[in-house]
Amino acid sequence: MDFKLSKTNDKLNPELFNSIALDAAKQVARAGDRVNKATQLRKFYDELVMWDQKTNLKPESFDEYLPFIKMLNAKVAYAEGRKLVDPTFVGLLNHGLKQVDSAETLHTFKLFMEAFMGFYKQERPN
């Protein structure tokens, strides 16, 4: 999976929250029935939402929050070890978190994951 959270020429890729998120959802949905349940993926999305909200309330604290935001990588690795998520979802989260370096990129990643979750629910309704 390859997507870019930062702006190019002052614009986000217009397909970031559309076809790119849909493609990511399709790739993650290909896993077996025992992994990548929507409720499990939602936990990671919910934590991103929480950090985005905290950052919006105190933008000056972003640098203090960043290590905890990046700790999502360890949490998703743990979930993979317990066979709750597959390597494709781990790669998706890792790729996005690697790009988070500001409140703006965190917010963009949160929006990307919001779109991903919507498409994922369509790809794997139950």
Image (cartoon, rainbow, N blue to C red):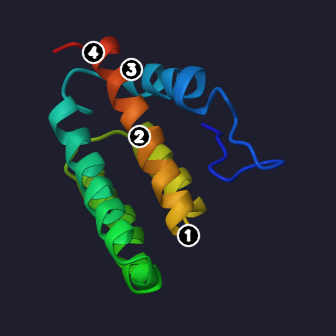
Q: Earlier in the sequence, mark 4 or mark 3?
A: 3
Badge 4 amino acid: Arg
Badge 2 amino acid: Met
Q: Residues within 10 Å of mark 4 (few under 14, many from 20)?
A: some
Q: Earlier in the sequence, mark 3 or mark 1?
A: 1
Q: Nearer the viewer, mark 1 or mark 4?
A: 1
Q: Which residue is mark 1?
A: 102
Badge 1 amino acid: Ser
Q: Secondary structure at mark 2?
A: helix
**Res 2 → quadrant:** top right
Q: Earlier in the sequence, mark 2 or mark 1?
A: 1
Q: Which mark is residue 124?
A: 4
Pinpoint residue 88: horizontal percent, then vertical percent. 45, 37
Q: Secondary structure at mark 1?
A: loop
Q: Which mark is residue 113?
A: 2
The span from disc 1 to disc 4 (Cα, nearest Å) is: 32 Å
Q: Earlier in the sequence, mark 1 or mark 4?
A: 1
Q: Is residue 85 visible?
A: yes
Q: Are marks 1 and 4 in contact (CB under 8 Å)?
A: no
Pinpoint residue 23: horizontal percent, then vertical percent. 54, 22
| Residue furthest right as drawn | 9
The span from disc 2 to disc 1 (Cα, nearest Å) is: 17 Å
Q: Which residue is mark 3?
A: 119
Q: Earlier in the sequence, mark 3 or mark 2?
A: 2
In this view, the residue in front, 33 or 10, is 10
Q: Are marks 4 and 2 in contact (CB under 8 Å)?
A: no
The residue lying at 42 percent from left, 70 percent from top is 70
Badge 3 amino acid: Phe
